[in-house]
Every structure is written in C-alpha cells, then in structure tokens.
Image (tube, rainbow, N blue to C red):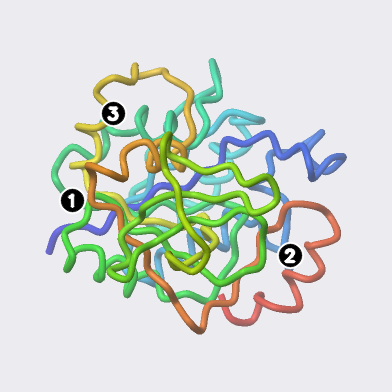
C-alpha cells in the first residue's frame, strides 16, 4: 500500500500567542499537557498517515529536538527547513515539494488547528475525486468566505465587510454560491505543482491566494463536514477552550 503522507505547518512566529512564543515555537505550546504539534501528529498517525513533513523556522531546533526525543512518534518525519526565510503557506508547500514528487496526494494541516474531523475520510474523498486540491471547510461565521458552486468547485472569495472579491474580475450576487470558511486542513495532489512553476523555490506566498489565482484552471474542491468541531488556537485565552472541547476527542 502506498504510504499516506502529510505536511504540518509548524514554522509560524506565533505572534498572537506572545509571551508564550518568546521562548518556544507555537508548535510546542502545550494544550492539555501536550504540545499542539504532538496532538496533530498523533491524530495523523491514528488516521493512517505514516510519513510527515514538518516545516520549521521560529525556534526550529526546539521542534527538531522534540521530534528526535520522541522517536518521531514511530513515523517517518522529514524537516523542511525555513530558518533562512519564512515562506508563508504556499511557499512552504513549494519548498517541501521535493518530498511529494512521487504522485501521492498529501494532507496539509496547520499545527494550531484541533478538530474532530475524520482525516482519512477527507484524504479518501480527495483521491476518489482526483482533484488538484480538496479543502476542508465549515459554516463558521466570519467576514471572509470561500465561494463554491453546487458541485463544490472553488470559484472565488468574498470579504463581506469590504465587498472585496478574488480572483481579479470575479463577481457574484447574493446566494449565487455556497459560502464556507477554510479550516486550515486540505489535501493536495502533486499535480498542483505545475501551477507553481512560475514561483521560485524560495518564493513567499499564501496557498489560499494561490488557490484563488488558479481556481479557473485547477480542480479545487471543497469538503464540508457537517459534524465538524474545530478550534484555531490563535491566542492564549483559546487554550483553555481547546482543552475543554477537544483533548478527550483527539
């Protein structure tokens, strides 16, 4: 059986979690007594993923040491080193593409997202539909929405507060598209890299902006989990909330 691969974004500065991140990377901030990176790795492992890429930048050596001290949790773990330059989400995926050139889809997971979603089901849906990317989305209330047609194809983005839309030239009327918020979890096929050929190996760019720039030519799908419970641990006060909601369900 082909190994199931994943990438964890662990390179961020974690500025909203200061002062905790003045002495440690966001990925090692504890939730329920365990670093958030450990929560995500164990969820991936339980879902059948066996090979993981972790990108690092802020306090990178702490993350490397943590993984080594835990025997990589019994998985094959690669480090994508961004210590020289933080590359954002799209640039991080582009830099790590060397690990994903075998044609096997890979799941991408933000380190600060905890959820109850079935990662294997998301991965299998992606492989069945043979999309370039499949984005886990929710009905979370926000001002900025990804817009999908009835076939769950990504068509655009809307900021309801400002009226701004993406990509360039995109226009929509109220009720024309399904409106969802991105979860920070997605599955990507290596076929997506052909659309990144214009980006340098060390280019810095957002993966969501990249998706929106290419949604007219790439096959980009949404995956709606109606039972999804998810929390983005973006600031200290959400840590206690995360413990209450998810520690016993991860």
Q: Give me the disc on residue 196.
A: 3
Q: Residue at x 47, y 26 (%)?
A: 81
Q: Nearer the viewer, mark 1 or mark 3?
A: 3
Q: Residues within 10 Å of mark 1 (few under 14, many from 20)?
A: some
**Residue 50 showing in the rendered view:** no
Question: Alpha-carbon distance for marks 1 and 3?
Answer: 17 Å
- Expressed as whole percent of the image width and height from the top left, the position of residue 101 reads 18, 37
The quadrant in which residue 10 appears is: top right
Residue in the image at 29% along x and 33% along y: 97
Are the residues flagged by discs 1 and 2 in contact, CB closer than 8 Å? Answer: no
Distance from the alpha carbon under mark 2 to that under mark 3: 39 Å
| Vertical side of 101 occupied by 183: above or below | below
Q: Position of residue 41 (x, y in %)?
A: 48, 59
Sequence-wise first label, 1 or 3: 1
| Mark identifier at residue 33 | 2
Q: Read off the residue under disc 1.
A: 104
Q: Earlier in the sequence, mark 1 or mark 2?
A: 2
- CA gap, disc 1 and disc 2: 34 Å
């Amino acid at each position: 059986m082909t190994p199931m691969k994943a990438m964890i974004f662990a390179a961020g500065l974690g500025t909203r979690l200061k002062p905790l991140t003045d002495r440690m990377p966001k990925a090692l901030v504890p939730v329920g007594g365990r670093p958030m990176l450990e929560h995500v790795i164990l969820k991936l492992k339980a879902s059948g993923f066996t090979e993981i890429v972790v990108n690092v930048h802020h306090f990178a050596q702490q993350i490397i040491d943590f993984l080594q001290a835990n025997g990589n949790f019994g998985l094959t773990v690669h480090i994508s080193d961004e210590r020289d330059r933080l590359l954002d989400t799209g640039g991080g995926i582009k830099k790590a593409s060397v690990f994903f050139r075998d044609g096997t889809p890979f799941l991408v997971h933000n380190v600060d997202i905890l959820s109850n979603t079935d990662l294997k089901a998301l991965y299998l849906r992606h492989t069945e539909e043979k999309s370039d990317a499949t984005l886990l989305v929710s009905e979370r209330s926000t001002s900025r929405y990804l817009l999908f047609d009835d076939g769950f194809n990504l068509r655009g983005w809307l900021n309801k507060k400002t009226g701004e839309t993406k990509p360039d030239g995109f226009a929509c009327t109220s009720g024309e598209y399904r409106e969802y918020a991105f979860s920070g979890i997605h599955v990507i096929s290596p076929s997506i890299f052909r659309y990144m050929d214009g980006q340098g190996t060390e280019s810095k760019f957002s993966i969501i902006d990249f998706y929106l720039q290419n949604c007219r030519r790439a096959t980009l799908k949404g995956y709606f989990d109606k039972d999804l419970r998810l929390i983005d641990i973006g600031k200290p006060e959400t840590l206690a909330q995360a413990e209450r909601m998810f520690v016993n369900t991860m």
